Image (cartoon, rainbow, N blue to C red):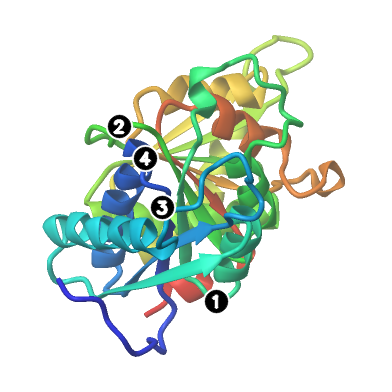
Amino acid sequence: MAPVEDPVETPVVVVGVDGSRLSLTAVRMAALEAGRHSRPLRVVHAFNWVADPSEPMPAEPRRPAEELLQHAIAVASQTRPEVPVSTALIEGPVITTLLRESGSAALLVIGDGGLTLNPDVPADSDATAVQIAARAGCSVLVVREDQPSPGPVMVGVDGSASSLCALDYAFDTATRRAAELVVVQVWDPDERTGEVPAEAAGQLAEAVAPWQRKYPSVSVRQEVRTGAPEAALLEEARRAEVVVVSARGDEPWRGMLGAVSQAMLYHSPAPVIVVRSSHGLYIQE
């Protein structure tokens, strides 16, 4: 498929590539997402020769990067031939470049940089994927090394406005994938019994009901748990095709990412979508 030369007016799905196997997996998943939402795909490669003087500069610095983008176009075309593809070769730091791209994107897709391969990485590390997920101007899909097997979409909710935004996104995602949706909410145990509070299931059902009416075709399984939210969601994430979380949930004091979204980025075996409140641009046609 030939690149689209003219800039598109509708928000695009952006994917960052670096030539690794992981970034090509990201291209495939980005093409699938673009196809599901009838959006164009923009493939971006950032390079900065000056920033890495240890690397020899090729005689024609742009040629390897241009070949990388052409390969990415071919991968996207094989995945979803109907999706229009444009490319951007930008000189500059990767994080700065992708954050700038996210400002006008519908969705940003990136590889996880091997986060799940090192479970001992501290949550406050400077991992590129985490920095981008924390600061992007749109929702971010963080891709794992291998494409996921078919399974449910999983979303965690806590009653906050941002988690309800993630719930909306998750329903839309399940609709477009024709997948089951698993909604998980974690409560503190009842002080007398140590079990799930009696009112928990009813309150979760009440919260989910408006979206069930909006998306009647989605099969929904509601799970009420006690314990640490991170552990409860990770248990379900092992069976999920994709995990959806809000960026901060009800913990705005934690900074740009909450504890749950960080835990999912570092430990979920499934791809993770970190949802921003502005994602309505992405799901509303």
Q: Position of residue 143 (x, y in %)?
A: 41, 41
Q: Secondary structure at mark 3?
A: loop
Write down the quadrant of residue 201 in the picture.
top right
Q: Cβ–Cβ below 8 Å for labels 1 and 4? A: no
- 194 w.r.t. 166: above or below: above
Quadrant in which the C terminus appears: bottom left
How far separated are the C-alphas under marks 1 and 4?
Answer: 25 Å
Q: Is residue 199 visible?
A: no
Dot 3 amino acid type: Val
How far separated are the C-alphas under marks 3 and 2?
Answer: 15 Å
Q: Position of residue 92 (x, y in %)?
A: 61, 62
Q: Determine which residue is flagged by label 1.
A: 104
Q: Determine which residue is flagged by label 4.
A: 20
Q: Which mark is residue 17?
A: 3
Which circle's residue, 4 or 2, is located before the other in the chain?
Answer: 4
Dot 4 amino acid type: Ser
Camera-nearest label, 1 or 3: 3
Residue 33 left/right relative to 102: left
